[in-house]
Image (spheres, grey):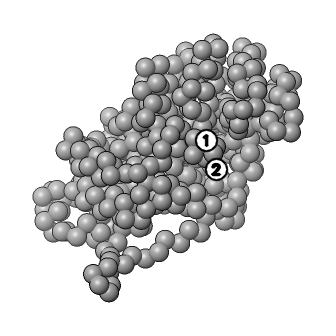
Amino acid sequence: MSVRLAASSRPGAIASRHDYTHQHQNPVKAVAESSRSRRRLWRAQASQSGTALRPEVETVGFNDGSATRFAPLINGCWTLAGGHGRVVESEIIHVMEMYARSGLTSFDTADIYGPSESILGAFREQWMNNKQENDGLRDVQIFTKFCPNIFRMKMTPQVVEQSIRRSIAALRVPKLDLVQMHWWDYDMPGMVDVAKSLAELREKGLITSIGVTNMSTEALSQIIDAGVPVVCNQVQFSLLDQRPRMAMLKYCKERDIKLFTYGTLAGGLLSNRYLEEGKKGLFGKVNYTTPDLNTSSLKMYWRVVREAGGEGHWRKLLSTLGEIAASKEVSIASVALRWAMQQGPVHPIVGLRNSTHLDDNLTALSFSLEPAEMDKIEEVLRTSQGPRGDCYEMERS
């Protein structure tokens, strides 16, 4: 279990599960009502005590001996890079503070995520100033990436260091908590040498920990065999995209390497928002509302839906998750996150744009899926058609 609750009863436990499921046979209505009930309860407790009942988030460490402790769920900042609407820095910093105060103190960014590093730098500076006045505030962790343009310049140690120093300046830190290295094309030479350059910068005191992102099992093993102390690999992983289960999960479990996973909610496609009762059409056909793919993330994850088996498979998965969510009085998003975390050393990265999903994220840390529930999900997953191959293989093709 990743959290301890700050009171004897779990948020949302308003009625017994038997009473709840008896009253709400329709999973669509049941899931929506359970989420509303949980939010009402937290608001009521907040008004009585001055602070809402929140799970006490327990932190996790890396395998490299560093003192870094991070939250089991990580706040993703890729939506600040563009393609998700207008960004107002002051509003985003306010949301970041809300998440950090809840115990979700870890943030994921990259040197290619537009103004993300600069915004996080401003947030961290403000947070540290507040922390001087309030010893109860935890440290925040900012995990960035090194995504070099290997097609336009040679990756010398000097070029690598210059890039790392730019991130240090943008984030307003003396050293980077974690640098996750990306390599766009395995046919381009230099991947292992660049990883070694990062290891040298770690020894130099510019980096605390080294990770990779979107690496295949083979590429990751090459870097580790070269002596680079990799602590994590960031890959796509969800109930729709199970590629890490083919080899990566086993490899990482054996070496105590963390998997930071993006797309675990498929841009929101694995959430209450898309759970609906189909309307009967002509000749027995069941019709659903066509999803509005109005962000770059939704367009990307809809490709994963198609690879997994199409809309029919996705709807079946949502229905199954909805039944489980209703029985546990949580949301579909919480179930999807919990499923991923029960696969091994998995820490989902959930997009941060506003505070509306904070309750779902925290709730995912407050329960476990039972073996029978996991089996029910696996029954649907066995009908999945893809994506095939190792991590990020489809995207590289």
Q: Residue 108 carries which label?
A: 1
Q: In this view, does 327 lie to the left or right of 355?
A: left
Distance CA(mark 1)–CA(mark 2): 8 Å
Residue 71 is at least partly visible in this image: no
Where residue 289 appears, x then y in whole percent?
Answer: 43, 76
Which one is nearer the viewer's eye here, 220 or 363? Answer: 220
In this view, the residue in front, 352 or 258, is: 258
Q: Crowding near pointer 1: few (<14 within 10 Å), some, many (20+)?
A: many
Q: Which mark is residue 99?
A: none
- The percent coordinates of residue 227 (x first, y second) are 63, 13
Can you say whether 75 is above or below 286 in the image?
Answer: above
Relative image position of residue 89 (x, y in whole percent): 71, 56
Closer to the camera, 130 or 207?
A: 207
Q: In which quarter of the image is the N terminus?
A: top left
Secondary structure, mark 2, is helix
Q: Which amino acid does the dot numbered 2 rest on?
A: Trp
Residue drawn at the location 48% of the way across and 48% of the way down? 387
Image point 44% across, 49% down: which residue? 386
Residue at coordinates 59% horizontally, 18% vertically from top-left? 224
Sooner in the amino-acid sequence: mark 1 or mark 2: 2
Q: Mark 2 points at which residue?
A: 78
Task: Look at label 1 and name its amino acid.
Answer: Asp
Element under disc 1: strand
Mark 2, other Cα within 10 Å: few <14 / some 14–19 / many ≥20: many
Q: In which quarter of the image is the C terminus?
A: top right
